Amino acid sequence: MPTGRKPILCYVTDRRALKTAPVPSDSSPRDPAPPPAHPLHDSIRRATAAGIDWIQIREKDLDARALVELVRFAVAETRGTSARVFVNDRLDVALAANAEGVHLGENSLPPEVVTEWRRSAGRMDFRIGVSCHSLESARAAERGGADYIFFGPVFATPSKAAFGAPQGIERLREICGSVKIPVLAIGGVNLENASACLAAGAVGIAAIRLFQDAAGSVDLPSRLKAI
Amino acid sequence: MPTGRKPILCYVTDRRALKTAPVPSDSSPRDPAPPPAHPLHDSIRRATAAGIDWIQIREKDLDARALVELVRFAVAETRGTSARVFVNDRLDVALAANAEGVHLGENSLPPEVVTEWRRSAGRMDFRIGVSCHSLESARAAERGGADYIFFGPVFATPSKAAFGAPQGIERLREICGSVKIPVLAIGGVNLENASACLAAGAVGIAAIRLFQDAAGSVDLPSRLKAI
């Protein structure tokens, strides 16, 4: 990393990408571990325990009632830790669950609308992030008062295929050099290419697969230290 | 009406139920009327001009960005009139568009969560309504601090089939006698049965089809006066 600062690591949830966890080989058939109350609870717990910085709850098909329960779980689980919880799209759910902030997509409320709400509500502590897929949208997010942006997809990834071809490291570098707010790289980021994103000027990386593993077979603490 | 008070009439939008409006027979082919910018704009204009009391924007499949534009249109269109605009489910969109209130369904944020937000934000002017389908949920909405409830479906209607069999007038009467907050009847309400709802204690009625007609062929002012 050029700055020497610790990168921000953001776990973006996707419960539909979770595989069913296999039964651990050392578990006793007569004393099975109870199944998690929610498929994401274990992933959130593991990421928090491993020292993740941000957790973005991004479960677009959940209704508000189910979503607020999940976000409240994450907020409670991260209390007393350094992890912070963001909610994708639903500002109201983020507020109701006392989350750190909201992360806005292309089809969410426009950033300037949410920052204006924040100003009038006197909630300058509440953070606002925006997903960007072009230099133009990155600059618009900055003008709109966003605190940070996600830029991507930097690399090829199935979950970001809807946002077009990979943008690549040079494009990421251009974005990082064009806005003053922090940029997190997203889209196909893994242990091998994360350092290139940081070297290009990203303050951190965001990912689903890198941080989410239903079976718990990945050594997440080591993985986080390696980035 | 037992009370002699003017009933509250609430138009609930459903743009998917709109049929394409036929070209008026007196329009010139060389000077066609421009198509409406949004399929609901004309319906909202007509209902406002006819003297509707409430308009609930209920377009569950619209994303937040499209929804806030539509709600802002409705709020602007009703300015200076007695009509008030509510937003289904999305508290954040209702706030961003400066709507009168939010209307919560079974899968929305729980009423007590939204009323707690209202209290802490000092927004006691912001109204909160709740859809109820049982005596239990009506009482829970009242305890949760709701300002009013919708109860139904009172009569058979395709759009409310998901909420079970019609509850009927006697059930509506029981609900109206069991909570102190105002109850609006919904579900298959038409010109013939509206008076029975009001006689049962409802302060008003809410409907899609009764107030929404893409072709504009219904004399909405007369219809509203007849209720």
Image (cartoon, coloured by chain):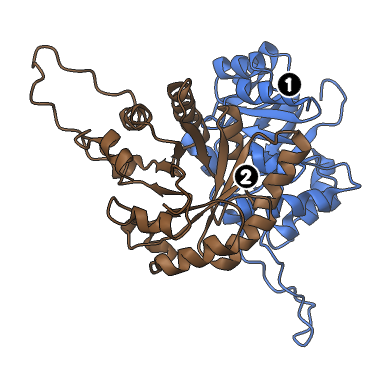
Chain colours: A blue, B brown
Q: Residue B93 shows which numbered tag?
A: none
Badge 1 and badge 2 both on one subunit: yes
Which class describes the residues within 10 Å of circle 1: few (<14), some (14-19), or many (20+)? few
Q: Position of residue B20 (x, y in %)?
A: 21, 36
Residue nearest the viewer, comparing A64 with B83: B83
Q: Which residue in the structure is indicated by mark 2?
A: A58
Q: Nearer the viewer, residue A112 or B22?
A: B22
Which is more toward the observer, B82 or B109?
A: B82
The residue that mark 1 highlights is A119
Q: Position of residue A1 (x, y in %)?
A: 81, 25
Q: Position of residue B2 (x, y in %)?
A: 45, 54
Which of the 4 image quadrants contains residue A175?
A: top right
Q: Amino acid at mark 2?
A: Arg
Q: Secondary structure at mark 2?
A: loop
- State whether residue B167 is above or below residue B219: below
Along the line of sight, the residue nearer the viewer: A60 or B214:
B214
Residue B147 image position (x, y, % from top left)? 61, 47
Q: Are marks 1 and 2 in contact (CB under 8 Å)?
A: no
Q: Residue at x 57, y 47 (%)?
A: B129
Residue at 9% x, 12% y is B30
Question: Mark 2, chain letter?
Answer: A
The answer to which of marks 1 and 2 sits earlier in the sequence is 2
